[in-house]
């Protein structure tokens, strides 16, 4: 037997914070293009004697932090899809259909945007540049790309997106479980940061690449939440809920 209850109104959303902080971060990154910060940070992880990045051939960074960790997040995404499909048939999951749908949408969008943007921007990885033993010429994000037979595929950061995509958990939980949502935010930010730093140590990305990725993932998850789940008090609506015996 199914009863009807009212979907609780969403907690107030401070758009000045949710949009303002990413906007300030983006402007700061554009200004940092006028400096050598990216290059200076990359040099911290480069061994000029060996002629390579210190983590380039690290088994732990490549096989565990990169491959295995990514597989765990992919498995979580698959379980999310299964849960969303099950919410159409399983009574206990039906009240959470919109949350599960928002989670799947957020995970899909915040990972699928990476590959097309890599192809369009053609930004080179640090390990491909002349400054770090490669053969390619460095160019700023908004500058024309030098002619090359091997266009870069390093902006934004794919592995960073694997971690930052879990910002979706924060938004999915923020109305029902706010304390758990805050923990989910910290977890997503920490995981994305670990993935980002690990790839910087390997020479796969500059610092700014990963910060841009965090901004994109945050905005995508925010947008999915706003259009799928966000319900101000004036728009709270009924939702099916299994009746207790």
Image (cartoon, grey):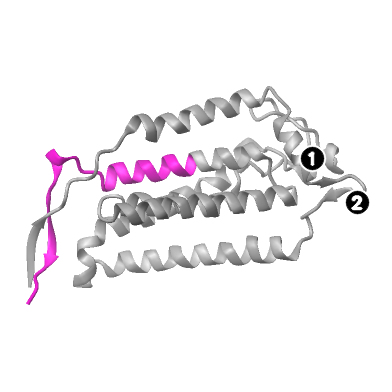
Q: Which one is in front, 59 or 176?
A: 176
Q: Earlier in the sequence, mark 1 or mark 2?
A: 1
Q: Residue at x 42, y 39 (%)?
A: 219
* In the displayed structure image, the side of residue 228 where residue 145 appears, left or right: right
Q: Residue at x 35, y 45 (%)?
A: 224
User: Residue 25 at x, y = what percent?
Assistant: 52, 31
Q: Which residue is mark 1?
A: 43
Residue 224 among magenta residues: yes
Which disc, if any, is residue 192?
A: none
Q: Residue at x 7, y 60 (%)?
A: 4
| The C terminus: image quadrant | bottom left
SS under mark 2:
loop
Q: Residues within 10 Å of mark 1 (few under 14, many from 20)?
A: some
The residue positioned farthest toward the front in the image shown? 179
| The N terminus: image quadrant | bottom left
SS under mark 1:
helix
* In the displayed structure image, the side of residue 156 where residue 48 appears, left or right: right
Q: Which one is in front, 146 or 100?
A: 100
Q: Looking at the image, can residue 149 be seen?
A: no
Magenta highlight range: 216-245
User: Residue 170 at x, y = what percent?
Assistant: 37, 51
User: Residue 125 at x, y = what percent?
Assistant: 72, 43
Which disc, if any, is residue 50?
A: 2
Q: Looking at the image, can residue 61 be seen?
A: yes
* In the displayed structure image, the side of residue 115 where residue 61 appears, left or right: right
Distance between mark 1 and mark 2 Cα atoms:
13 Å
User: Residue 30 at x, y = what percent?
Assistant: 59, 26
Q: Residues within 10 Å of mark 2 (few under 14, many from 20)?
A: few
């Amino acid at each position: 037997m199914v009863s009807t209850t009212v979907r609780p109104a969403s907690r107030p959303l401070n758009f000045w914070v949710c949009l303002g902080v990413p906007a300030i971060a983006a402007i700061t990154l554009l200004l940092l293009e006028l400096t050598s910060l990216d290059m200076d940070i990359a040099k911290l992880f480069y061994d000029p004697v060996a002629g390579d990045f210190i983590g380039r051939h690290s088994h732990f960074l490549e096989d565990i932090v990169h491959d295995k960790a990514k597989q765990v997040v992919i498995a979580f995404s698959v379980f999310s899809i299964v849960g969303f499909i099950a919410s159409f048939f399983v009574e206990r999951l039906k009240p959470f259909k919109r949350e599960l749908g928002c989670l799947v949408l957020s995970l899909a969008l915040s990972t699928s945007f990476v590959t097309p943007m890599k192809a369009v921007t053609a930004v080179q990885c640090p390990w491909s540049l002349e400054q770090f033993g490669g053969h390619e010429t460095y160019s700023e994000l908004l500058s024309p790309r030098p002619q090359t037979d091997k266009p870069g595929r390093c902006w934004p950061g794919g592995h960073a997106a694997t971690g930052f995509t879990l910002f979706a958990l924060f938004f999915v939980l923020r109305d029902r479980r706010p304390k758990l949502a805050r923990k989910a935010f910290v977890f997503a930010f920490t995981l994305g940061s670990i993935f980002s730093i690990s790839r910087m140590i390997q020479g796969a990305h500059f610092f700014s690449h990963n910060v841009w990725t965090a901004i994109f993932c945050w905005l995508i998850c925010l947008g999915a939440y706003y259009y799928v789940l966000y319900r101000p008090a004036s728009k709270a609506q009924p939702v099916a809920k299994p009746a207790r015996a």
